[in-house]
């Protein structure tokens, strides 16, 4: 008979992701990650033999699967551009709990000029977000160069609003930014 896990994998990954969102990769010790999951450190090492790096990679893979099923299809679908942006901003509001949640992609980013598997996965995710947003901008009439600039501006606004909202403890910063996002992409 197979031994049942003390914590279901999806619950464990969610808890680990939350720990990384709270304190970042460097701030998350194995003791903290153990506490977040309710598992012993030895149980974590049994599940993740390569330690915190493997945990971070699997948390990113989980996030990536979510984006591939819930966010990227919105941007690449056949809906009108305005509807895509409405759905995208709604999804971002949910993903970031209306601005109360830090961005996992930011919190797991490696130090500048230090490549690792997480950094590569994060770059690929941002590139796919850029490509999807560019597709929406082009569908609304933007040239390739303009679409790229608009897509970059959306990601800059999104990430910046998360930092500012957290820094000044004012979630309305994030809400106002979400209201501006469609106009950035859809402007004539």
Image (cartoon, rainbow, N blue to C red):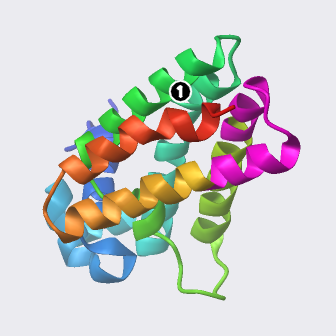
Identity of the residue drawn at 48% across and 40% down: 181
In the image, which residues are magenta?
A: 133-152
Q: Position of residue 50 (x, y in %)?
A: 49, 72
Tell me if residue 89 can be seen.
Answer: yes
* For residue 149, above or below residue 175: below
Q: Residue 132 appears in which quarter of the rendering?
A: top right
Judge whether residue 8 is colored magenta. Answer: no
Tell me if residue 19 can be seen.
Answer: no
Depth order, front residue of 6/66 = 66
Depth order, front residue of 60/40 = 60
Q: Is residue 171 left or right of residue 53?
A: left
Name the main secondary structure of what is drawn in magenta.
Answer: helix
Judge whether residue 138 is colored magenta. Answer: yes
Depth order, front residue of 108/136 = 136
* For residue 38, above or below residue 181: below
Q: Is residue 72 left or right of residue 141?
A: left
Q: Position of residue 98 (x, y in %)?
A: 25, 41
Label 1 sits on a secondary structure element that is: helix
Identity of the residue drawn at 27% across and 76% down: 30
Q: Residue 34 appears in which quarter of the rendering?
A: bottom left
* For residue 74, above or below residue 34: above
Q: Which residue is mark 1?
A: 85
């Amino acid at each position: 008979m197979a031994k049942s896990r003390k914590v279901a994998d999806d619950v464990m990954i969610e808890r680990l992701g939350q720990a990384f969102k709270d304190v970042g990769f460097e701030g998350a010790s194995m003791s903290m990650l153990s506490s977040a999951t309710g598992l012993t450190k030895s149980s974590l090492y049994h599940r993740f033999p390569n330690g915190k790096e493997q945990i971070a990679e699997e948390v990113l893979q989980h996030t990536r699967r979510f984006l591939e099923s819930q966010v990227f299809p919105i941007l690449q679908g056949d809906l009108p551009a305005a509807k895509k942006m409405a759905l995208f901003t709604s999804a971002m509001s949910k993903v970031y709990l209306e601005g109360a949640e830090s961005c996992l992609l930011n919190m797991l980013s490696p130090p500048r000029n230090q490549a690792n598997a997480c950094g590569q996965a994060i770059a690929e995710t941002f590139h796919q977000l850029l490509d999807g947003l560019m597709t929406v901008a082009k569908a609304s009439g933007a040239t390739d160069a303009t679409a790229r600039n608009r897509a970059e501006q959306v990601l800059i606004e999104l990430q910046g609003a998360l930092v500012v909202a957290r820094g000044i403890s004012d979630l309305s910063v994030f809400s106002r930014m979400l209201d501006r996002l469609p106009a950035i992409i859809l402007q004539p």
